Image (cartoon, helix red, strand yellow):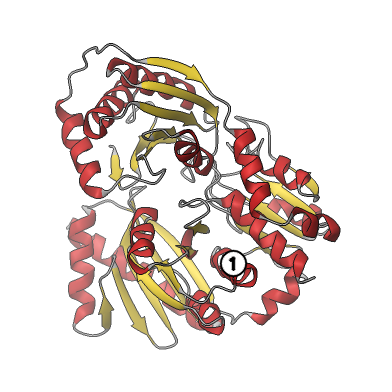
Amino acid sequence: MLIFSSSGLRGIAPEWLTPEIALRAAVAYARALNPDAVLVGRDTRSTSPLLELSVVSGLLSEGVKVFRAGIVPTPTAFFAVRELGLDGAIVITGSHNPVMWNALKMANEEGTFIKDEVMKKIIDTLREVRCGWKSGGKAVVVDIIERYVQFLKGVVDCEVIRKRGLKVLVDPAAGAASHVTPRVLREVGCKVVSVNTCPYMSFRHYEPSQETLAYLHRILRTCDIGFAHDCDGDRLVILDPRRGALDPNYTLALALESFHDKYGYKGFVVVNFATSNMVRDVAESLGCKVIYSKIGEVYVLEEMRHKGALIGGEGSSAGVIFLRLNPTRDGILTSLMILEFLARERIDLGEKLEEYPRYYSFHEKIPLDTDAERLTTRIYKDLANSFEVEVLDGIKVSLDEGWVLFRPSRTEPYMRVIGEAIDEERVKELKRWGVKLVRDIMREMAR
């Protein structure tokens, strides 16, 4: 089973996402966008080199000039599209998905994810594509890392960071940012402790979370702050020496305050439908107004452009977008912005966290054994008559002192149940209620 979304296509590789499908997808991409030159990069998964060859072959067969970047973070690849004046990019990466998964992330000439209507065209073409051969295609190797590092160093005040001398723990999940984040943090003057940087041998699940990062607690105590990525570096989870891995919403809140502190920003902030109310509270305290979008980077970015918002992101997945710096989720850039903020204001991370309103949250993934659309419809029917329901993306129910969101994942075969409350016991109740509701309905539908 392949899963298609606004970011591309993904599945277990090579069982679902086969080399043949990767080749045909690259051909379909070329026919839908008609590019002259495309960057191709990949993460460190064992299946990525094979899929990379298939993608390169598909593009070459359509006469496209291919810039091969090798192992490269997704935000770096998307930056390269604009930096090199290319027409798009395909990055082979399963991102936060388990190791057996992989994906093709597709970008346009702006270095952002392609729009839904273009993705639909690619899907329709993929089903019927017959590979041919056009002249003009050739492949060249390009090193974009150096330009990207220099770009990052030009965004922040390196001297301010250097004077603070922060000791930073970095866990890039042995992924594509392993040779980027530790390097750039050292070059801006941090004392860096890097772990889990050997390609193809990650110590943990690629999705950074409190559970997967718990093994770092001892070494974290010796540092001022820690950063953790997923496999392609677009997500950034922050680690505090006392609290450990923070809820991903803290990444967006800290990034927002960093942006406000640096530029005096008081405009719109676009966040996805699953983002914590804590981010809204922080935004309002800074004179900003939060606008909600559907879940997915492409939808956040579209709403940012529509509203003229210069910062936005997905608190639920620790992804931040700085529109005029690099208009895609960029975990590496976000780490530098937060470090500059802490260094300039001489702030201790733990003390800053105490200033933020406290919400308790949960994020459960329930394996689907029925059609996701039918299940979502049934959940809506069960809830609409009794609760205040919002349907911007999934089904969000407002309850006493909290909310619960039911939404089928676009990247995995799961129903996601996400919620939060201002009371720890209340959030446990909401979690039990939400998970039970989904499982009860699935059992009933299976009869």
Residue 336 in view: yes
Classify 193 as above or below 273: above
Residue appearing at x 44%, y 20% in the figure: 50
Classify 104 as above or below 385: above
Front residue (pair 421, 138): 138
Q: Is residue 384 left or right of residue 110?
A: left
Front residue (pair 318, 31): 31
Q: Is residue 243 left or right of residue 282?
A: right
Residue appearing at x 73%, y 47% in the figure: 185
Residue appearing at x 34%, y 15% in the figure: 137
Residue pointed to by mark 1: 259
> Where residue 395 sits in the image (x, y, percent)?
28, 70
Residue 211 in view: no
Front residue (pair 111, 371): 111
Residue appearing at x 54%, y 39% in the figure: 73
Q: Amino acid at mark 1?
A: Phe
Quadrant in which residue 392 is drawn: bottom left
Quadrant where the image shows the N terminus:
top left
Toward the bottom, the furthest residue is 400
Quadrant in which residue 303 is drawn: bottom left
Quadrant in which residue 359 is drawn: bottom right
Quadrant where the image shows the C terminus:
bottom left
Q: Is residue 382 left or right of residue 367?
A: left
> Where residue 358 sits in the image (x, y, percent)?
59, 80
Number of marks in the rendered image: 1
Question: What is the crowding at mark 1: few (fewer than 14 residues within 10 Å), some, or many (at least 20)?
Answer: many
Classify 438 as above or below 83: below
Front residue (pair 24, 263): 263
> Where residue 191 sits in the image (x, y, percent)?
83, 49
Circle 1 sits in a helix, a strand or a loop, which is it? helix
